[in-house]
Amino acid sequence: MPFALSSHDDYVVRLVIGSVTCSGALIDDDRVLTAHHCVSARSSQGEMLPRDVSPESVRIELGGDDLPWGEASVRAIVAPTCGHAAGDGDIAILVLEHPLIGMETRRARLDSPPALKETIEPIGFGRCALSTDALHRRKRPVASIDTVVDSRFRATASICPGDSGGPVMSDQGEVLGVISAAVMDADERTAGRAEFTRLDHFRALFARADAVAKGQSQAELPPVDCK
């Protein structure tokens, strides 16, 4: 892969799963963090089903513009037992077929929770209906956390379809959360209520993904519940 083409912000990637597109973040050279509902199977009517797609059906696009400069494939989807339709458990870690040596990654903040009034920056490949420019990675306006609950936190932020699964960055450059759901209209300049998944609540999921990345079978590992 032409990693010489990669930029400082290419840790944010785009996911393509059939007709579904989402965003994600490289948290290690062989792991992508995203939202669980992004990799949920869909019915013929587009409804989310309580099971995941096959890892082989997920394509990871590299690069920040509408034409990716590279792609990566997925060998395992590590996710909680819930979260297929967003809400609690809306987090997943994709273990890649091959490590992306030399790519930018960002540390997942697991040792401390999000704090009230902490500033955050959501990033994703979302595009609202009134957007006139081509598809590309967008850093959304900085927002401030106003609510923290067991497994999620909330803020008033600008989010568009396709941003789901994208990273929520702290002002220290760490991944603090995952974009899960938001009140959206057709204008990306409109800020609405947005909900994000806390990473620190799912430390067991990160441990499971680490074991899978090192070759352990998921069948040998205990499931990660949402409680």
Image: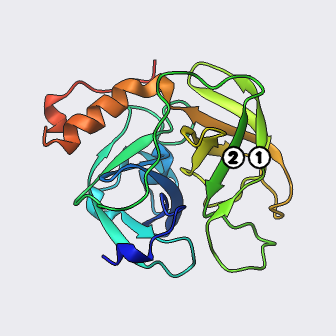
Checking the image for residue 142, the label placed there is 1
Mark 1 nearby-residue class (10 Å; few <14, some 14–19, many ≥20): some
User: Which is more toward the observer, 4 or 210?
Assistant: 4
Q: Residue at x 57, y 76 (%)?
A: 65
Which secondary structure lies at badge 1? loop
The x, y position of residue 18, in whole percent, is 43, 69
Lateral position of residue 196 relative to residue 210, left or right: right
Q: Amino acid at mark 1?
A: Val
Marks counted in the figure total 2
Q: Residue at x 67, y 37 (%)?
A: 195
In the displayed structure, would residue 25 be above or below residue 79?
below
Instruction: Mark 2 or mark 1: name the one nearer the start of the chain.
Output: 2
Q: Residue at x 47, y 27 (%)?
A: 110
Chosen colour scheme: rainbow
Q: Amino acid at mark 2?
A: Glu
Checking the image for residue 121, the label placed there is 2
User: Which is more toward the observer, 41 or 67?
Assistant: 67
In the displayed structure, would residue 161 be above or below residue 88?
below
Lateral position of residue 7 relative to residue 217, left or right: right
User: Which is more toward the observer, 31 or 227?
Assistant: 31
User: Which is more toward the observer, 186 or 45?
Assistant: 186
Does residue 99 appear anywhere in the picture? Answer: yes
In the displayed structure, would residue 91 be above or below residue 10?
above
The x, y position of residue 64, in whole percent, is 55, 71
Toward which corner of the image does residue 126 lie, by quadrant?
A: bottom right
Tell me the distance, in whole angstroms, between the alpha carbons under discs 2 and 1: 5 Å
| CB atoms of marks 2 and 1 within 8 Å | yes
Does residue 40 appear anywhere in the picture? Answer: no
The x, y position of residue 184, in whole percent, is 77, 53
